Image (spheres, grey):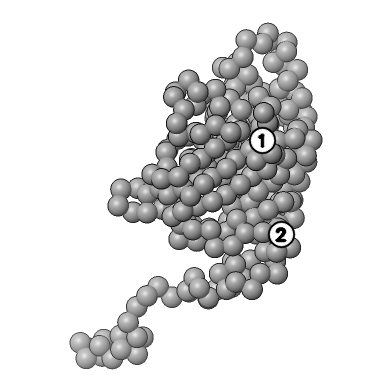
Amino acid sequence: MQHDNLVEIEDVEFGYGARPVLKGINLTARRGQVIAIMGSSGCGKTTLLRLIGGQIKPGQGRVRVAGESVGELDSAGLYRLRRKMGMLFQFGALFTDMSVFDNVAFQLREHTDLPDDAIRDLVLMKLHAVGLRGASHLMPAELSGGMARRVALARAIALDPMLVMYDEPFAGLDPISLGVTGNLIRRLTDTLGLTSLVVTHDVQESLKIVDYVYFVSEGVIVAEGTAEDIRASGLPYVHQFVHGEADGPVPFHYPAPSYADDLRLGAQRA
């Protein structure tokens, strides 16, 4: 039976040693949705993606993908599930010694027994979907940052996954490439009927394309809702993040003694 909720995270806690990272996280991603996970650096966003992909297991709680408990799968079950997932790493992470064509073909060659002519057709189809069929012969060093990100996206959808996870897909892009990448995420999600989980700091671009947003701070979800809900939020942390304000719940100044006391102490030492 197919579940409407493709990803379900229930009361998940996780830490590295004695340092807690996630504290009772609950998150749901429905099929066909673009879900954004936002928050400041180090709040646990990428850790969530690693839990979903089965690279790590929760200390408590459960992570389900397509109804399967990821943390309870054996190696064979985990690899089978991962074949239905795509991942777009920050800055693309293309194989530098492979052409654009071979980067996209890599998963098809590793995980299928398709003949070369079928692989060729599928690679060109995926590259055409991201507007780069004419660049199939280029090497990664010959690509702009935006082009490399689009090739990585074509590679992420090569096996027609049900879920694609994006780790900071907008980082380092110029405004045109940023807009193109955002539109591609939305269009491919709708066209292929997949689910997209986007970890990002880029609030304005993300809010143009997402169906739902989760805000993470200090290991907990502090706010969630549609793009309209997030824009209108009166929560101080969300307001500061959305509007890029220098001071607020996340302070501009690192904790320190009184400035006047520091100056006075310095004068006394002099």
Name the secondary structure under disc 1: loop
Q: Residues within 10 Å of mark 1 (few under 14, many from 20)?
A: few
Q: Quadrant of the C terminus?
A: bottom left
Residue at figure coordinates x 44%, y 23% from the top left: 75
Q: Is residue 168 visible?
A: no
Task: Give the alpha-carbon distance from disc 2 to disc 1, as whole Å.
Answer: 24 Å
Question: At which x and y percent is residue 108?
Answer: 63, 19
From the image, state whether disc 2 or disc 1 is nearer to you. 1
Question: Which label number is shown at residue 227?
Answer: 2
Give the position of the N terminus as an image quadrant. top right
Q: Are marks 2 and 1 in contact (CB under 8 Å)?
A: no
Name which of mark 2 and mark 1 comes first in the sequence.
1
Q: Residues within 10 Å of mark 2 (few under 14, many from 20)?
A: many
Residue drawn 37% across the image and 75% down it: 255
The percent position of residue 19, horizontal first and vertical second, equals: 33, 54
Which residue corresponds to mark 1? 3
Q: Is residue 160 left or right of residue 21?
A: right
On screen, residue 221 versus residue 131, left or right, reads left
Task: Say if residue 77 shows up in the picture.
Answer: yes
Q: Position of residue 238 (x, y in %)?
A: 60, 67
Task: Using the image as rendered, state which of residue 182 and residue 198 is in the foreground.
Answer: 198
Amino acid type indicated by mark 1: His
Residue 146 position, x and y percent, is: 67, 43
Residue drawn at (64%, 73%) of the image: 234
Hey, what amino acid is under mark 2? Ala
Q: Give the quadrant of residue 265.
A: bottom left
